[in-house]
Amino acid sequence: MHQPELFPPPRGHIGTDESGKGDYFGPLVIAGVFVEDEQQGVLRELGVKDSKSLSDNRVRALAEALKQGYTHSLVAIGPEKYNELYEKLKNLNRILAWGHARVIENILAEVPSRQAITDQFGDRLYVVSALMKKGRTIELIQRPKAEEDLAVAAASILARAEFLKRLHFLSKDWGLDLPKGSSPQAEEAGLTLVKLHGVEALSKAAKTHFKLTDRILKLV
């Protein structure tokens, strides 16, 4: 006779998202969060939504609450490592797929989940092929505007908070305010960085495949 499970696995799903892919300076951060079905209301009450619609201070505050209450994983790829991977793979979507697959695997090591939802950033097969043994049993859903899902929104908050923290410390390391995004301010900061520390500093602080790099090097 089949015995009922004493502690049935929680019903819920994993959401994953990334931060930093459009920022010239700083790392690429991928985060994943497992949210039980009955916790959806709590996230809504907390004000969890896509990090792009929240202030940096709100993102930091919510990230602390999420870290304490939810099974999560963070994978941060610093600029040097990112540039190495990009040189090798020549494809941002493959780097993203590797990162998303790792956070899914890390969460599955702690809690069983039958489903993971991620934003649409490239061929779904990139992520599927990057998943290892544990992740091969999960249903992977990629969809545009995935941040409308609360688990994905929570992951976007964790990823952004970690990105902001690492960008802050990177700025302190170089003694220079390294801005978010890839605006004219980023170009100006890149130019100053090169003048102060040499061209090689860019590969340690920035994502060098951005077109900004060519513009900065022409101005030096």
Image (cartoon, rainbow, N blue to C red):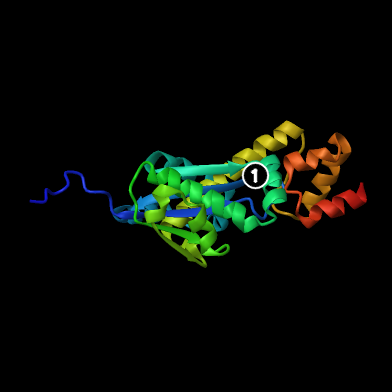
- Please tell me in which quadrant of the rendered image residue 126 appears: bottom right
Q: Which residue is at the far bottom? A: 144
Judge left or right: residue 83 versus residue 42: right
Judge left or right: residue 45 versus residue 181: left
Q: How many marks?
A: 1
According to the picture, the residue beneath numbered tag 1 turns out to be 27
**In this rendering, is residue 7 above or below 47?**
above
Q: Residue 56: image x %, image y %?
A: 58, 48
Judge left or right: residue 202 versus residue 70: right
Q: Nearer the viewer, residue 134 or 41?
A: 134
Q: Residue at x 76, y 49 (%)?
A: 208
- Please tell me in which quadrant of the rendered image residue 11 appears: bottom left
Residue type, numbered disc 1 = Pro
Circle 1 Cα neighbour tier, 10 Å, few/some/many (<14 / 14–19 / ≥20): many
Judge left or right: residue 76 versus residue 151: right
**In this rendering, is residue 143 above or below 198?**
below
- Say whether residue 66 is visible: no
Q: Residue 212: image x %, image y %?
A: 80, 54
Element at label 1 = loop
Q: Residue 32: image x %, image y %?
A: 46, 49
Q: Residue 176: image x %, image y %?
A: 77, 37
Q: Residue at x 55, y 49 (%)?
A: 99
Q: Residue at x 85, y 54 (%)?
A: 214
- Say whether residue 98 is visible: yes
